[in-house]
Amino acid sequence: MKKLNIWGFCLAIAIVWSAGTILAGWFAGLGWGDLYVRVMSSIYIGYEPGFWGGIIGGIWAFFDGGIFGLAISFLYNVFSEDKKKPKAAKKKR
């Protein structure tokens, strides 16, 4: 099975999670999804509805998503390894 590029997957998850967190903070400033932002602010210090709160939450989410992506891609590569060793080809004489 093909292995995942650990750092590429890590960066992709970090960017997606960060962008979603920033957007949630900005939309909460308009009154949508305020409960989500209040719950997540118990994890991400400084995360609150509004422009700067969304940016602060996005920075936290980037690192959080990066760690999560790193763990998931590492575990995927460990468990998806082909356990069968290929047999050595016999040489013809």
Image (cartoon, rainbow, N blue to C red):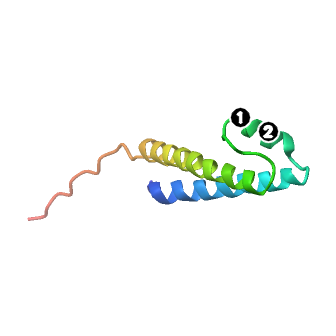
| Residue at the (54%, 50%) spot, across then down | 66
| Residue at the (72%, 51%) spot, across then down | 21
Instruction: From the image, tell me which residue sits under label 1.
Output: 42
Count the labels in the image: 2
Q: Quadrant of the C terminus?
A: bottom left
**SS for tag 1?**
loop
Residue 73, position as x, y percentages in the image:
49, 49
- The 10 Å Cα crowd at callout 2, few under 14, some 14 to 19, many 20 or more, is some
In-image side of 56 versus 32 (left or right): left
Residue 90, position as x, y percentages in the image:
17, 57
Residue 79, position as x, y percentages in the image:
45, 41
Q: Amino acid at mark 1?
A: Ser
- The numbered disc on residue 38 is 2
Residue 23 appears in which quarter of the rendering? bottom right
Q: Quadrant of the N terminus?
A: bottom left
Cα distance in 3D space between marks 1 and 2: 7 Å
Q: Amino acid at mark 2?
A: Arg
